[in-house]
Amino acid sequence: MSRANTTVHQGGIAAAIEFYRQAPTPNLIVVESRSSAGLITELDSLAEVCDAGTKVLAVGHTNDIAFYRELMRRGISEYMLAPVQPFSLVETIAGLYGETTSSKLGRVYAFMGAKGGVGSSTVAHNVAWTIARRVSLDVIIADMDLPFGTAGLDFNVDAGVGIGEAIQDPARLDEVLLDRLLTKCGNNLSLLAAPGTLDRSYDICEGTFERLLEVAQASVPFLILDMPHLWTAWSRNMLKAADEVVLTAAPDLAGLRNTKSLIDFLKQARPNDPPPKLILNQVGMPKRPEIKPRDFAKAVQLELTACIPFDAHQFGTAANNGQMAAEITGKSAAARAFAEVSDVLTGRQPLKGRRTPSFNLSSIFGKPKR
């Protein structure tokens, strides 16, 4: 529980329902109720305001096996009989996430440009910043461009050794060391920075980053890989290992060819995974002949996730100030695009009003498919 962020609210399930109508639900909700007959109804109402994937641990005062089986049948993660001892509660929560067959806590998103200079790093940094702001969950950005990474500059932080030390001896990397190597970039956002020095070459083996992914996925909900435009054994391996791949391209012929090549590779290497997300960046650059977004998407046979307009002043000012685009102009088209990409990747919305549920209790509280 050392890395768990916990908040306590009075009022039972009724208060939880009201609170989560206007706030994202966490990975786990622990609710206590003295009711037995009305507990099922209360949990049905709670399901209406929960995000998909949220687990629920119910604490009750009814010691009845039939009642317990009914809760399990409806998909409650676990039921504990009050009064609950602290160590029993911690053990139960650890058991919900400690099963060897259970899904990992964190998801990995690999951002890669179809060619150099298309703004993939800018997109990755802005999307990571937006995720941290919109869903208030921890996000790590890993700058994978070891000699020339710019994440530290974009966030205006003194990054330190970061990812260079993390891969120096992967066997010794654990949650404690990873936490020490991270640089805070604001609430819920941390950076694993690239060394950014040329005093040595970076000849990286194929499996070097596997331990980093394993530790990071066990530590935080979201890991953003800012991939350089390289085609090496380790970069191919990262694209295969990520939960989602986000391709950024400019609307020109080279971008079209490279994007199609990357999509074809990913379809073959990840036949059972979703197709990559495609972002068209720098759209509408003055005096530059461009391929129309609709024609670009048709040629690569992939729907566009977002189109980000060219805005030299906004992005140039942000880069020089060490800020994100939304900090310069919060209502710009680029800021809206980053928010849309954030929602697509996380599957979460920043605020929820009253809505009609399109799913039952089991689909929300059910354990993930094995």
Image: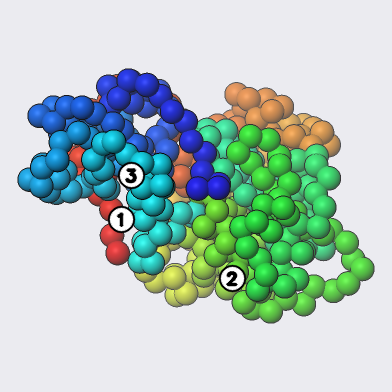
Q: Is there any visible trace of residue 240 in the rendered image?
A: yes
Q: What is the C-alpha distance between the residues marked 3 and 2?
A: 28 Å
Which quadrant of the figure has residue 70?
top left
Which quadrant of the figure has residue 228?
bottom right
Q: Is there any visible trace of residue 299 in the rendered image?
A: no
Q: What is the C-alpha distance between the residues marked 3 and 1?
A: 10 Å
The residue identified by callout 3 is 55
Image marks 3 and 1: residues in contact by CB distance under 8 Å:
no
Q: Quadrant of the C terminus?
A: bottom left
At label 1, the amino acid type is Pro
Residue shown at 69%/59% (left/top)? 177
Q: Give the class, few, some or many, for how many residues have Cα within 10 Å of label 2's Cα (few <14, many ≥20).
A: some
Residue shown at 51%/70% (left/top)? 240
Question: Tag 2 or tag 3, which sits nearer the N-term?
Answer: 3
At label 3, the amino acid type is Lys
Q: What is the C-alpha distance between the residues marked 2 and 1?
A: 23 Å
**In terms of depth relative to the viewer, which is nearer, 86 or 287?**
86
Residue shown at 14%/45% (left/top)? 68
The residue identified by callout 2 is 210
Look at the numbered disc 2 and give the secondary structure of its residue. helix
Look at the numbered disc 3 and give the secondary structure of its residue. strand
**In terms of depth relative to the viewer, which is nearer, 227 or 194?**
194
Image coordinates of residue 291 in percent, x first then y, are: 59, 51
Image coordinates of residue 37 in percent, x first then y, are: 10, 29
At label 2, the amino acid type is Glu
Look at the numbered disc 1 and give the secondary structure of its residue. loop
* Mark 3 vs mark 1: in front: 3
Residue shown at 13%/27% (left/top)? 38
Question: Tag 1 or tag 3, which sits nearer the N-term?
Answer: 3
Q: Which mark is residue 368?
A: 1
Image coordinates of residue 82 in percent, x first then y, are: 26, 36
